[in-house]
Amino acid sequence: MTGKEILCILFAYLLGGICAGYYLVRFRTGLDIREQGSGGVGARNVGRVLGRPGFVITLLGDALKGVLAVVLARNFEVSAPALSLVLVAVIAGHIWPLPLHFHGGRGIATAIGAYLAYDPLLALALLCFTLVLMVFRRGFILSGLAAFLLLPPAAHALGYSGHAVAALAGASVIILFAHRERLRKAFAGAAARKEA
């Protein structure tokens, strides 16, 4: 891997760490969004504090940095494996941002933006999986998380390269890890309903 590629991956991580919701809430109210609501810096939690405009701005800002990281790396003509690592790095940067002491968001919007720039077919597949799963179970977030898990094997079946499939799998793992508390509660609730 070249020095240029390492710099692009590092830049993607640092770019991911610029969490739009945190700075927006801090600028508008002086509050630390991590001390409000769910404690996340993502669009849903920002929306609780700033309403729909805050939700939209944060969603777009988080998605845009995913797009920007991949587009810039591609413009620097990095290798395909390095580009796959850029995709993972920008998501990891959002979840574990250096400026916020590694306490960031949960990565979904940033991942969608990165997937759109990497290959729009991946973002479309993610959306389709989510919508199909919502037919069988309630909840957009849980269906979306399941869709992230389905994406790597689907990409493999469609003939994507090994490094692309590995990057998608890595992104899915860290996104699921970021949502671990939500998943734990969901599974605990399902178990309780089954016992009732």
Image (tube, rainbow, N blue to C red):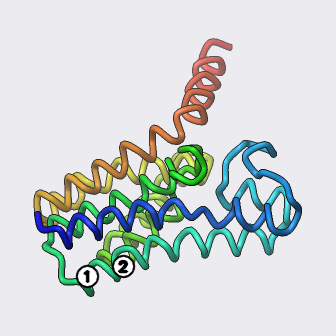
On the image, numbered disc 2 is attached to which residue?
117
Q: Secondary structure at mark 2?
A: helix
- Which percent across, then down, holds residue 45? 74, 53
Tell whether 80 sits left or right of 13: left
- Which percent across, then down, holds residue 179? 54, 40
Q: Residue at x 49, y 47 (%)?
A: 96
Give the residue type at disc 1.
Answer: Arg
Q: Residue at x 76, y 59 (%)?
A: 46
Q: Which mark is residue 74?
A: 1
Query: In the image shown, does 99 or 127 lie closer to the viewer?
Result: 99
Q: Residue at x 33, y 62 (%)?
A: 10
- Is 179 situated above or below 31? above
Give the residue type at disc 2.
Answer: Ala
Tell whether 43 sits left or right of 186: right
Image quarter hosting the N terminus: bottom left
Q: Which mark is residue 5?
A: none
> Nearer the N terminus, badge 2 or badge 1?
1
The quarter holding residue 30 reads bottom right
- Is 29 situated above or below 103? below
